[in-house]
Amino acid sequence: MKDIIKELQGIRKSTNLNYAVKTSVEDFTKQIFNVLFDDRIDLTQGFSELEILFKKAAKISCLSTKEVCDKSWINFANSLPNILKDLNKDAAYFMESDPAARRVEEIYFAYPGFYAIAIHRLSNEIYKLRLFLFARLMSEYAHRLTGTDIHPGATIKSPVFIDHATGIVIGETCIIEPFVKIYQGVTLGALSVSKDKQDTKRHPTVKSYVCIYANATILGGETVVGENSIIGGNVWVTKSVPNNSVVYNTIESHIKPR
């Protein structure tokens, strides 16, 4: 047993992992959603608790200078009013877009798509502060709960409607403009590229008032879905789509004679 432990210690020296960052980020993610949306929580006390959780996670994950890391909480806190305004616009658009929604409270507390976009808007701000691991762990926590995989680097303008949410994938350099509707199983992804293309735009741009139905796949950094277009279910798109287009699969039905 001593030999096994010694061998494991030797192997572990080649990495620099601290699992505490994962649990710290998850604690922060749970708490910030509650602070933003639970009217029973006192904001002064809630913010104090958030600051402690944020700084704990940021200290482990920050790769910038100490001065930059120390300022990250203030910069993030300053962004929260605008994020909350955007999320309230998202919730109103969910309510407008889904006939099954009977009360706006359903959107905030029972819709996985809203939870996914809420955590994305928060993690995206943290991503902009170059706390990349922190942001990615937030997005993966939301992914685990909702089945929606949104990279924290993606640009998603408000409002947006994500229905059902399960199986949606949105890549790092994707740009989604306001008033877009996305249904379950949609992939906004990249065509296969080499690692040296990491900093190039690899994922599509979706213009305003586009509706993307279930299981559609749209790929490529140069692919643009034009305004007011409809992308039908199960289609495969790798080229740009003009404004006011309808893209769909043609399926023939043959009635079997009796």
Image (tube, rainbow, N blue to C red):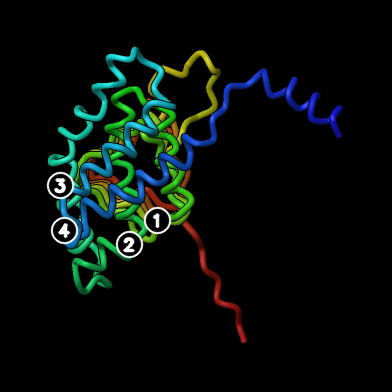
Residue under label 1, please give it: 165
Q: Are marks 2 and 1 in contact (CB under 8 Å)?
A: yes
Task: Residue 44: give its label.
Answer: 3
Query: How many other residues sit within 10 Å of disc 1, few (<14), some (14-19) or many (≥20)?
Result: many
Compare marks 3 and 4 and give the one earlier in the sequence: 3
Q: Residues within 10 Å of mark 4 (few under 14, many from 20)?
A: some
- Direction from residue 166 to residue 129 in the image, left or right: left
Where's residue 238, x and y in %?
44, 34
Foreground mark, 2 or 1, reads: 2
Q: Callout 1, which amino acid?
A: Ala
How much space separates mark 1 and mark 4, taking CA atoms? Answer: 17 Å
Residue where numbered disc 2 is placed: 111
- Give the alpha-carbon distance from disc 3 to disc 4, as whole Å: 27 Å
Where is residue 202, by image quadrant?
top left
* Residue at horizontal 32 percent and vertical 62 percent from the top: 111
> What's the amino acid at mark 4?
Ala
Q: Earlier in the sequence, mark 1 or mark 4?
A: 4
- The residue depicted at 36 percent of the width and 15 percent of the height is 64
Question: In the rendered structure, which disc, 2 or 3, sits on the residue that comes first in sequence?
Answer: 3
Amino acid carrying label 2: it is: Tyr
Between circles 3 and 1, the one closer to the viewer is 3
Name the foreground residue: 78 vs 91. 78
Observer-nearest of 16 and 209 = 16
Mark 2 and mark 3: Cα distance apart in space: 27 Å
The location of residue 3, given as percent across then percent down, is 86, 27
Quadrant of the rendering where the C terminus is positioned: bottom right
